[in-house]
Image (tube, rainbow, N blue to C red):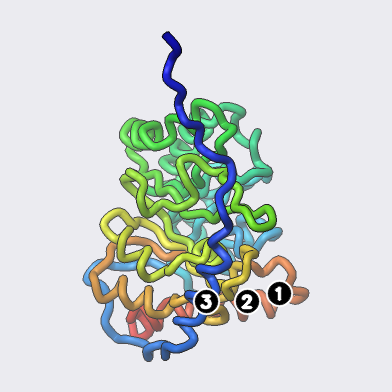
Amino acid sequence: MSRPRHRRRPFTVPNSARANSLRHREVLDLQNVPAADEHRSVHPIRIGLSTSSVYPMTVRECFDAAARLGYDGVEVMITNSEDTQNPELMRLLVRSTGLPIMAIHAPTLLFLPRVMHRDHWEKLRLTAQLAKDVGAETVVLHPPFRWQGDYARRFVPGVREIAQETGVALAVENMYPWRAGIREVLVYSPDWDNTHQDYDDVTFDFSHASTAGVDALAAVRTLFPKLRHVHLTDGSGSLSDEHLVPGRGRMPVAETLQYLAKHDWAGDVVVEVNTRFTARRSTRNAMLAESLAFARRHLGLASV
């Protein structure tokens, strides 16, 4: 008697992201962005600066920029730079600037497979331990790639186990599909879309949503009960991950921040914009100041 065959998950599906993106852009073009709202959440929403927003500058330079511009804290993205893995340095910068580390971003990018540890589960444990060592309560991480073996197969329950084991929230970030012509390549497991996954905590990124053709406000409404962290940026609706200054793209960023404030959200907003191609420090500072002002305005914090 032959064994029943299990249907294998396809590696590609029709590319709907571009059509979705165009459709959302058409809808957004017909809407007027509401004026800044003075309502703010009953919970203190902090606005932080990601080290990725000042790349390739150092962690120290990120803290200095955040303190000078008036941010509430910093998110450190772990890279192959030793400074991003050095708890003593981070604690020193916390003391010298008075700014807390709001989150640690795990080294789960495609080009960082061996940073901290070759084993992906151990890498998450080490990241969570680093977060505890520097006083951060959140670790931001991307979903795994399908070829990452047990890590991909057991990702959802495994993330929950490590969060319970370490006492650190592991907030899984929304990503976007990769494209190959008219097809989408399904590279993430269980999916790039975190709205229908059984995570306890999630991160929402506006640029990734733009690239995926996702309705950001609808996604945030769905994720609201477990939304712990927001990467504040923007996108024009193109198929590239742009990480624009909020307000310079076509995503409903203002409306979404206002929604969070009006519904008494309790979480952190971290500016994650691309400044790496700016030629002048003054231009970078202006972009970061503009991003902070945008966040404060639409979270009802401008007068605080």
> How busy is the neighbourhood of tag 2: few (under 14 within 10 Å), some, or many (20 plus)?
some
Identified by mark 2, the residue type is: Asn
Q: Residue at x 47, y 54 (%)?
A: 174
Q: Which mark is residue 281?
A: 1
Q: Could you tell me residue 267's position as x and y percent? A: 33, 61
Q: Which mark is residue 246?
A: 3
Which residue is disc 2 drawn over? 285
Q: Residue at x 55, y 68 (%)?
A: 19
- Mark 2 and mark 1 in contact? Answer it, CB < 8 Å: yes
Can you name the residue that lies furthest to the right here?
279
**SS category of the residue bearing label 2:** helix
Instruction: Quadrant for the N terminus, please.
Output: top left
Q: Quadrant of residue 256?
A: bottom left
Instruction: Quadrant for the C terminus, please.
Output: bottom left
Which of disc 3 and disc 2 is earlier in sequence?
3
> How busy is the neighbourhood of tag 1: few (under 14 within 10 Å), some, or many (20 plus)?
few
Of badges 2 and 3, the one in the foreground is 3
Along the line of sight, the residue nearer the viewer: 255 or 271: 255
Distance of mark 2 from mark 1, alpha carbons?
Answer: 6 Å
Q: Is residue 271 visible?
A: no
- Give the answer, above or below, for where 275 lies relative to 127: below
Identified by mark 1, the residue type is: Arg
Identified by mark 3, the residue type is: Pro
